[in-house]
Amino acid sequence: MTVLITGATSGIGEACARSFAAKGAHLVLVGRRAERLKELASELSSVHQVAVTTVVADLRVRSQAEGLLESAKFPEIDVLVNNAGLASGLEPFPENDPDDWDEMIDTNVKGLLWVSRPILKAMLHRLKSDPTARAHVINLGSLAGIAAYPNGAVYCATKAAVKLITDGLRLDLVKHPIRVTLIQPGMVETEFSEVRFHGDKARAKAVYNGIEPLKAQDIADLVTYAAFAPPHVQITEISVNATHQASATVVHRNL
Ligand code: NDP
Ligand code: 8X3
């Protein structure tokens, strides 16, 4: 199995890379931070004897997002994990910085679209000569895509878009043996909040005060579960929260 993971330099994407490698999958790892990709690739290829290719790409740039297969020189992808994404800012809408909107929409929505189309075309092409080939797209949505929460309108909208794009893909691909999965986590402790608060570590840490959040590994376990399910089993959607998180706004904190 060969798995292409976007956003593999930290958090959920990195945990997915570790889990797939431990299960013997070859990897194409994508992100902007070249040094992190290099270190992870060298570790995983030597520990697990799997082939790991890296592509340094900014998915907000259409040519880079569309060109992953050529850059990786690896046309045969069995599983695409569309994980790269971010929230930027958490303020009432009128105080939002439109540059944050661009970054979220360009990465979470347009980047995902640009990455997916050529890879799906390659999967469809391969299935013509090998109908037993694996083909699976796994998208990272969010609890934020199920209902809006205060100060998060645009991030929530991007994740709602991911949910509906995933549903649309599943409809359009139904006659092909291509599985389409959406994973919708609640709060997961990664670099997500530090990125959202533009590097404010104290504000990021406070998000997880008094609650045990999900770990990146918890999400990687679900992603690999979906990927390794028997070929006739399509996990369509998994929602997962920390035990003390009921919704985006209802969290029990033991303070
Ligand atoms: P992290 O910030 O730890 O990881 C985000 C990853 O996305 C990094 O590897 C980053 O790599 C990559 N990325 C961001 N922007 C770009 C870009 N323009 N081009 C290429 N890669 C990019 O966060 P998480 O692991 O938590 O987030 C992963 C996904 O999970 C996101 O889609 C997020 O929305 C979603 N999610 C997260 C939740 C959470 O609470 N943490 C909950 C629900 C969903 P680099 O900076 O090197 O480019
Ligand atoms: C990340 C989860 O609730 O912080 O998508 O938006 S949340």
Image (cartoon, rainbow, N blue to C red):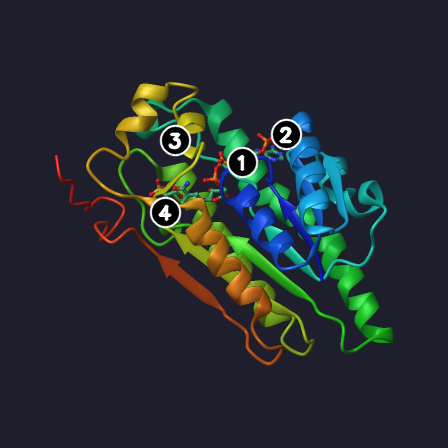
Label 3 and label 4: CA atoms lie apart by: 14 Å
Q: Is residue 116 left or right of residue 82?
A: right
Q: Is disc 3's CB within 8 Å of ligand 1?
A: yes
Question: Which residue appears at 19% of the width and 45% of the height?
Answer: 251
Which sits in the foreground, 67 or 109?
67
Local secondary structure at mark 2: helix
Badge 1 is on which residue? Answer: 10
Q: Is disc 1's CB within 8 Å of ligand 1?
A: yes
Local secondary structure at mark 3: helix
Label 3 and label 2: CA atoms lie apart by: 19 Å
Q: Quadrant of the N terminus?
A: bottom right
Q: Is residue 153 left or right of residue 100?
A: left
N-term-proximal mark, 2 vs 1: 1
Amino acid type shown at disc 2: Arg
Badge 2 is on which residue? Answer: 36
Mark 2 packing: few (<14 Cα in 10 Å), some, or many (20+)?
Answer: some
Question: Which residue appears at 43% of the width and 34% of the height?
Answer: 192
Label 1 and label 3: CA atoms lie apart by: 13 Å
Question: Which residue appears at 67% of the width and 46% of the height?
Answer: 47
Badge 3 is on which residue? Answer: 193
Question: Does the CB distance between marks 2 and 1 fall below 8 Å?
Answer: yes
Label 1 and label 4: CA atoms lie apart by: 20 Å
Q: Is residue 166 above or below residue 50?
A: below
Q: Give the number of the mark in front: 3 or 2.
A: 2
Q: Is residue 102 left or right of residue 55?
A: left
Local secondary structure at mark 1: loop
The numbered disc on residue 144 is 4
